Image: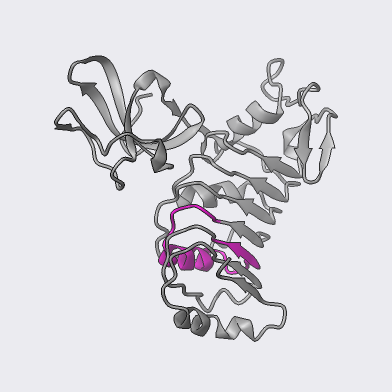
Amino acid sequence: MTIEVGERVMIGGHSAVVRYVGEVSGHPRVWAGVEWDDPSRGKHNGLVNGVQYFRTSSARGGSLVSIQNVHRGVDLLTAIRNRYADSSADENVFVINSKAVELFGMQSTSQKQSNVFELRHIVLESCSVAGPPPETCPLFRRCVSLNLFNNLLQRWEDVRKILVYFPRLRELVLRKNRMDAAGVGEAWSDVKCLTDLILSDCGLTSESISNVLRYLPGLRTLYAVGNRFSHFFVPEVADSLLNLDIRDNPIRCLSNITENLSKLVLCPSFSIFMFG
């Protein structure tokens, strides 16, 4: 399939968004203009030899790279199979490679797992996850924590679809996924057990965070460190929230935050981290 403008991709283990696909004057082959999640990796803003191929939000956050070096994301089930399972014998049988030592929670194990759908803790850091599993995928009924740190997710609807396959999930890590703005919407009624959500370094505004709290009113812990909001609002439906970490945000006004949290602070077990 053709790589498209707006698609999140991996290049040499680093994530970026495609801003341009096509020819570059004076150079053969097809090139991709990308805007890096980490702008320090870039060389320009899309202007090369007097031609503006694309634009980036920062002055030097973009690069032109050969299309052959650009790797698309995979669905969640493919990523799990790639990391945990050996499916060479039978597509319907998943066996963990016995030579690999994987970390499940706080325990290290080298035992074979006969079925990835029995895993309780799944860690998929930097595995190019870009979307939910196929509709025919069985449920991960035992999994209670899913770590998707530094992947290629961007649509909240894809996050909701992923959660449907994890009916007992309590903790979800989405740190360093550059998420789209979260629009106003109803609570995700098909998500029952999720209590801890990590949204640090996702490039989110306060409005998006508030809308996510509306999607998931049962959250007890929310980490939203290193985003880009100057104010914060906790919707009334988020009355289960007990722990909130919003450090490393350009917060300009403290009063509106404390006013919005006044109801929650009355709870003796509530904790909030805003600085440090």
Q: Is residue 105 left or right of residue 50?
A: right
Tell me where residue 2 appears, x and y as whole percent: 34, 25
At x 32% / y 36%, what residue is drawn?
A: 62
Name, please, the residue furthest toward the top.
28
Q: Nearer the viewer, residue 217 or 202?
A: 202
| Residue drawn 45% across the image and 47% down it | 178
Task: State the residue in front, 32 or 136.
Answer: 32
Question: Image check: 45 left or right of 233?
Answer: left
Q: Is residue 32 above or below residue 222?
A: above
Which one is in front, 37 or 135? Answer: 37
| Quadrant of the image containing the N terminus | top left
Location of residue 201 in the rendering, given as x and y in whole percent from the top left corner: 50, 52
Residue 273 sits above or below residue 5 on the image: below
Residue 28 lies in what quarter of the image? top left
Is residue 209 highlighted in magenta? yes
Along the line of sight, the residue nearer the viewer: 92 or 71: 71
Q: Is residue 226 magenta?
A: no
Which quadrant: the C terminus? bottom right
Vertical placement of 227 versus 241: above or below?
above
Q: Say which residue appears at 35% left-offset and 20% top-offset.
A: 66
Q: In which quadrant of the rendered view does residue 59 lie? A: top left
Would residue 191 be visible to someone looking at this image?
no
Can residue 193 be seen here? Answer: yes
Q: Residue at x 77, y 25 (%)?
A: 100
205 left or right, relative to 50? right
Q: How is the image coloured?
A: one colour
* Among the 4 quarters of the image, the one containing residue 72: top left
- x, y (%) of residue 102? 76, 33
Q: Which residues are magenta?
A: 199-224
Where's residue 240, x and y in %? 64, 74
